[in-house]
Image: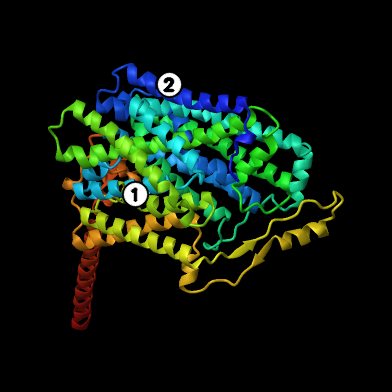
Amino acid sequence: MTVSPSHFSAVDYVIFALLLVGSLSIGLYYALSGGRQRTTQEFLMADRSMRCLPVSLSLIASFQSAVAIIGVPAEVYVHGTQYWFIGCAYILGLLIPAHVFIPVLYRLKLSSAYQYLELRFSKSVRICGTLTFIFQTVSLNMTGFKLWGVVLATGLVCTLYTTMGGLKAVIWTDVFQTLVMFAGQLAVIVVGVHQAGGLSEVWWKVWEGNHISGLDLNPDPTERHTFWTLGVGGVFLMLSLYGVNQAQVQRYLSSRTEKEAVRSCYMVFPSLQLALALSCVMGLVMFARYCGEDHSDKLMVIYFVMDMLQGLPGLPGLFVACLFSAALSTISSAFNSLATVTMEDLIKPHFPAMTERRATLLSKALAVCYGLLCLAMAFLTHLMGDSVLQVALKIFGMVGGPILGLFCLGMFFPWANSTGAIAGLGAGLTVSFWVGIGSIVTRTPGTRVLLSDCRASPMTNNTTAIFTTAATSVPLSRPSGLRRFYSLSYMWYSAFTCFTVILIGLVVSFLTGPMKEEDVTPGTVYPLMGKLLCFLPDSVRQKLCCVTPLGQTVCKLMLFPYQIYLIIITLNYMRQQSDQRSHQTYLIQLHQEKCN
């Protein structure tokens, strides 16, 4: 389904043009105001002057991409509302970054999240982390529209205002585009409900079509979507995005204060829930409109919008502007973050004498280059063959999970060393691509979902509903052996690869010699054990823990786990000595008894 000009009126073109002009105007404004983007601090970090409201809206925009607006309704249309349970993962997925990752990264005054890896481990670990992020971000921008005109226009507009206005322009255009996204989705839902016959009619159709999913507590990790895959596996997906991803971390670091950064993370939660609800409701309205018709050969959401709104001037243009807003916000975030990590992690360390003017010009050139590269990569989307949403989350889990594991290894395990970090990252990436590519090659889904028909009589009894439920999924033969390993739900990719990095990193660190306390850079370790032992009296915690210059409590039991081993050996030795003395006393008493 392509967007034909015949579907567009003059009003639609005007609304669509206003979006592009508005985005470019914001970029031009910040190019000509303030410091005019003459320093890398202003161009890449917005002078660290942003408040929590624009930062929080920008965080939403970079997450609520065109992939989500197109993919989530299509997911709900085919599989029902099970995906909605990922909203449970948003709680821990935002609380942990707010109270763990943001305090550590903000207090270190970083420009790139991967500077942390050099402070904690070494320069080689930093470079490995940076290259992994670059690969991940370029790959993610392969997913999205299959319409080349849309890709080209989106990429060019993003490149222009990102290059002109820097991070300030990116954040404020995100604010503008977030409002457009919500308006576009809401307009489509309202019109769709009206054309479907009202709320009661929509509810009856999705209920009869078995599209209201219950709580699925199946623990099988190969099941595509259950409460555990979405609610638990989704936490790790959220952490890899909101905890350590450069696009999000760069927004935290641009905040005026640490409190503003933490507050912006809190403000994201209700907006993300609203965005998820709108996308899921749109999928249900689509199902009520088509009653389970198979439109897999079309870009479902665009087909639905153009089919419904073509007689209402302005609304098709508003929704296409909504899609463009989502794409613009995500891609501009990618361009800016890619330019930042390349400049800060790969170029500046080798050219410390580079002037500020030249560094800023080079940063802008990098943004342009990455824009053109992402445009060229966009044609490769169709090779993976899955849904748009699944492709995007699969890529994010395959690459984002190992990056999350690398940061967790550094923050929570002070004895982990540089060798262990590189080995862990390599193992995590190897395993993730092994599983990911294996799942693409073997193609062994557990069930084949058939769309239900909601055209039955309103008087349908419970028996009919049961037969409808039974007919919605046709089990295929359950994979075994290696094929079962490949059928792991893509929502577990982040968790699986994260734990792989940590496990291999710790083993290699112990084999090559754990890092010593004096070698750990102050402020790079989060006091995990100190927080977990919060129930102990202060006197006991003070004996177990020490305080770093940044005011963070780092437990000595964490810093030297091998000391615990020494303590155990010492206690065992003392016990043996005590047993030996007891044995000697017994012999003396026995000798005295014989003498008597």
Q: Amino acid at mark 1?
A: Phe
Q: Residues within 10 Å of mark 1 (few under 14, many from 20)?
A: few
* Horizontal arrangement in the rendering, residue 210 relative to residue 23 (left or right): right
Query: What is the tally of numbered marks visible in this picture?
Result: 2
> Image height check: is 219 above or below 315?
below
Pick the residue in front: 271 or 138.
138
**Which mark is nearer the camera, 2 or 1?**
2
Single out the residue that lies furthest toward the top: 33
Where disc 1 sits, the SS reads helix
* Horizontal arrangement in the rendering, residue 111 relative to residue 88 (left or right): left
Residue ID at (56%, 40%): 69
Residue tagged by mark 1? Answer: 135
> Image height check: is 584 above or below 486?
below
> Image height check: is 355 above or below 199?
above
x, y percent for residue 289: 73, 44
Where disc 2 sits, the SS reads helix
Residue 336 is labelled as none
Quarter where residue 284 is shown: top right
Quadrant location of the C terminus? bottom left
Residue ID at (62%, 51%): 82
x, y percent for residue 524: 26, 42
x, y percent for residue 215: 63, 53
Q: How is the image coloured?
A: rainbow
x, y percent for residue 166: 34, 28
Single out the residue that lies furthest toward the front: 6
Residue tagged by mark 2? Answer: 25
Q: Verify CB contact (< 8 Å) between mark 2 and mark 1.
A: no
Residue ID at (20%, 53%): 515
Single out the residue that lies furthest toward the right: 459
Q: How far is the residue under mark 2 from the one under mark 1?
A: 31 Å
Q: Amino acid at mark 2?
A: Ser
Q: Residues within 10 Å of mark 2 (few under 14, many from 20)?
A: some
